[in-house]
Image (tube, rainbow, N blue to C red):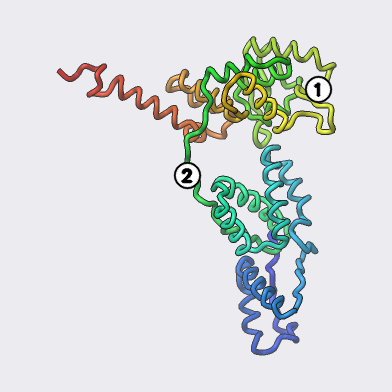
């Protein structure tokens, strides 16, 4: 992909309408990097507006506003991001561009600061900035917008907090609360595989090998991996499949979407939680509960296996995400084998 051109290209022999006093300033402006040019031009545009002078936005691409490049960016997201990421990023970008049709660095900084002042969490504000970076990086790299107003903006620091993980007994009570085969199949897959919501909701029957008890999962970035399923889940899925009249999707719907989305599954889980008499849980929290259980039960060698099961890019992500299990393991090791622990009986 080619880089977008500079906002200004100064040619002294063609700038006949510029007074001699302004020529050095315009020449210096043309030599600034695109982001600095944008700041200066927007200041000039604001001053001009105060004096009743309209300065049109002219871009080499022909775009009058960034939102006109939305279709190109959405095509990029389809090829490079998960369904959940696409939905979240598109929501934030559309919302921000509606409020700021032609954003510059200063306006975006003001927007993010206002969000924080309103009590929006740092993680949510960081997500907004990530969405904007994805959008403007795409437009800038494809030459559709002459500058990138978010190129040098940094995400707000988000402090790590303990993940909310439902107790193991609550997870099993959730399964017991299911009444339909569709509910039971969904919860069984969640508990048995620890797959992401988007990996389960897009499942097709051709991806399930009942004889080998394996599922071929398409994860982030279309990375393929195989996940084991139990005999229990195999039996539930086989019975459930017989009710679908040959539909290719594992979780189809009758509407134009063709399959469940995150709202459908969350509503179902809320209903099951009420039925089971437990605190509300989400798909992702169940994933965390399963991973934590496997790490606790699997011993020191479990990290790599669980990392592969979860579809993490590397084990460092797994360790960072589930550091609480590692802390408990170290604490247990110290209590059982430390020189001064009661169990070693080294002290007389």
Alpha-carbon distance for marks 1 and 2?
Answer: 43 Å
In this view, the residue in front, 327 or 182, is 182
Query: Which disc is residue 73 wearing?
Result: none
Residue 343 shows in this picture: yes
Most distant residue in the left direction: 348
Using the image, tell me which numbered label, if any, was put on residue 248: 1
Q: How many marks?
A: 2
Q: Residues within 10 Å of mark 1 (few under 14, many from 20)?
A: few
Graded by Cα atoms within 10 Å as few (under 14), some (14 to 19) or many (20 or more), the crowding at tag 2 reads few
- Residue 203 position by quadrant: top right
Say which quarter of the image contains residue 47.
Answer: bottom right
Side of 334 relative to 125 (left or right) = left
Seen in the image, is 132 located left or right of residue 163? right
Which picture quadrant has residue 257?
top right
Closest to the observer: 177 or 215?
Answer: 177
Q: Position of residue 339 (x, y in %)?
A: 23, 23
Whether the residues at callouts 1 and 2 have beta carbons within 8 Å, the answer is no
Q: Is residue 257 above or below residue 213?
A: below
Which residue is painted at 75% across and 47% down in the image?
74
The residue that mark 2 highlights is: 159
SS at mark 2 in the image: loop
């Amino acid at each position: 992909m080619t880089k977008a051109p500079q906002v200004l290209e100064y040619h002294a022999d063609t700038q006949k309408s510029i007074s001699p006093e302004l020529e050095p300033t315009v020449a210096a402006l043309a030599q600034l990097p695109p982001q600095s040019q944008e700041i200066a031009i927007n200041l000039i545009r604001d001053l001009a507006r105060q004096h009743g002078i309209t300065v049109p936005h002219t871009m080499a691409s022909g775009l009058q506003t960034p939102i006109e490049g939305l279709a190109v960016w959405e095509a990029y997201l389809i090829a490079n991001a998960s369904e959940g990421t696409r939905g979240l990023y598109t929501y934030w970008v559309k919302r921000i561009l509606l409020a700021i049709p032609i954003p510059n660095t200063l306006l975006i900084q003001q927007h993010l600061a206002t969000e924080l002042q309103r009590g929006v969490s740092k993680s949510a504000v960081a997500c907004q900035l990530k969405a904007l970076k994805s959008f403007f990086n795409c437009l800038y790299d494809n030459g559709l917008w002459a500058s990138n107003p978010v190129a040098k903006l940094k995400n707000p620091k988000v402090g790590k907090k303990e993940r909310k993980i439902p107790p193991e007994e609550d997870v099993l009570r959730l399964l017991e609360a299911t009444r339909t085969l569709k509910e039971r199949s969904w919860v069984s897959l969640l508990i048995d595989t620890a797959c992401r919501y988007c990996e389960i909701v897009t499942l097709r029957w051709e991806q399930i090998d009942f004889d080998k008890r394996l599922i071929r999962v398409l994860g982030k970035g279309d990375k393929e991996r195989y996940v084991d399923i139990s005999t229990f889940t195999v039996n539930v899925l086989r019975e459930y499949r017989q009710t679908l009249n040959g539909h290719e999707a594992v979780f189809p719907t009758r509407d134009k979407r063709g399959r469940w989305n995150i709202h459908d599954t969350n509503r179902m889980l809320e209903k099951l939680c009420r039925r089971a008499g437990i605190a509300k849980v989400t798909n992702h929290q169940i994933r965390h509960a399963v991973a934590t259980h496997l790490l606790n039960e699997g011993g020191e060698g479990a990290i790599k296996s669980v990392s592969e099961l979860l579809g993490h890019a590397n084990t460092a992500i797994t360790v960072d995400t589930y550091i609480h299990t590692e802390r408990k393991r170290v604490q247990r090791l110290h209590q059982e084998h430390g020189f001064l622990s009661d169990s070693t009986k080294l002290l007389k």
